Amino acid sequence: MRYVGDFFMLLGAAFMLLGALGLVRMPDVYNRIQAAAKSATLGAIALLLGLAFLQPGWWAKLLLIGLFILFTNPVGSSTIVRAIHLAGVRPWQVTAKEKLEDRS
């Protein structure tokens, strides 16, 4: 059980790291919110699952925390994106100069 728990904890940490990388690398706020919300949800669920394998007595509490994260994180991120959209922030678009730079 220790190795399975460690594997899920490592997997959760990897998702969180990739989400942080997505926050830095994505071109606009819409893509950044998408990367952060998905990776934070998957990373937190994997961390909780790993913790459930390491501490089997905590499974009921961890299940409630996981369900809370599964329901609130997507709703929160979509609410933030809706507010950004209503504020008039436009999505990023590739310019002609960037297309030419990619060809070379």
Image (spheres, rainbow, N blue to C red):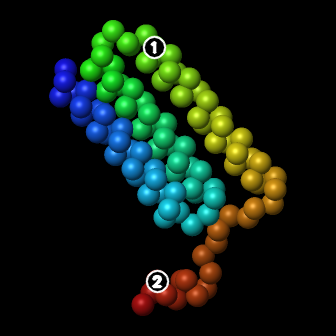
Provide residue 89's location: percent of width, then percent of height.
75, 62
Q: Is residue 19 above or below residue 93?
A: above
Q: Is residue 1 above or below residue 86?
A: above
In the image, taking residue 51 as reference, residue 74 lies left or right, namely: right
Density class for disc 1 (Cα within 10 Å; few <14, some 14-19, many ≥20) is few
Q: Which of the two residues, 86 or 96, is positioned nearer the viewer here?
A: 86
**Residue at mark 1:** 61
Of pointers 2 and 1, the one earlier in the residue sequence: 1
Q: Distance between the residues labelled 2 and 1?
A: 50 Å
Density class for disc 2 (Cα within 10 Å; few <14, some 14-19, many ≥20) is few
Query: Mark 1 is on which residue type?
Result: Lys
Q: Which of the two residues, 102 or 57, is positioned nearer the viewer here?
A: 57
| SS type, badge 2 | helix
Q: In which quarter of the image is the N terminus?
A: top left
Q: Which quadrant of the figure has residue 32?
A: bottom right
Q: In which quarter of the image is the C terminus?
A: bottom left
Q: Which quadrant of the figure has residue 48?
A: top left
Q: Residue at x 61, y 85 (%)?
A: 96
**Residue at mark 2:** 102
Q: Which residue is drawn at 33% across and 9% down?
A: 57
Provide residue 79's location: percent of width, then percent of height.
71, 41
Question: How many marks do you count on the picture?
Answer: 2
Q: In this view, does 21 lie above or below 13?
A: below
In the image, taking residue 53 as reference, residue 60 lies left or right, namely: right
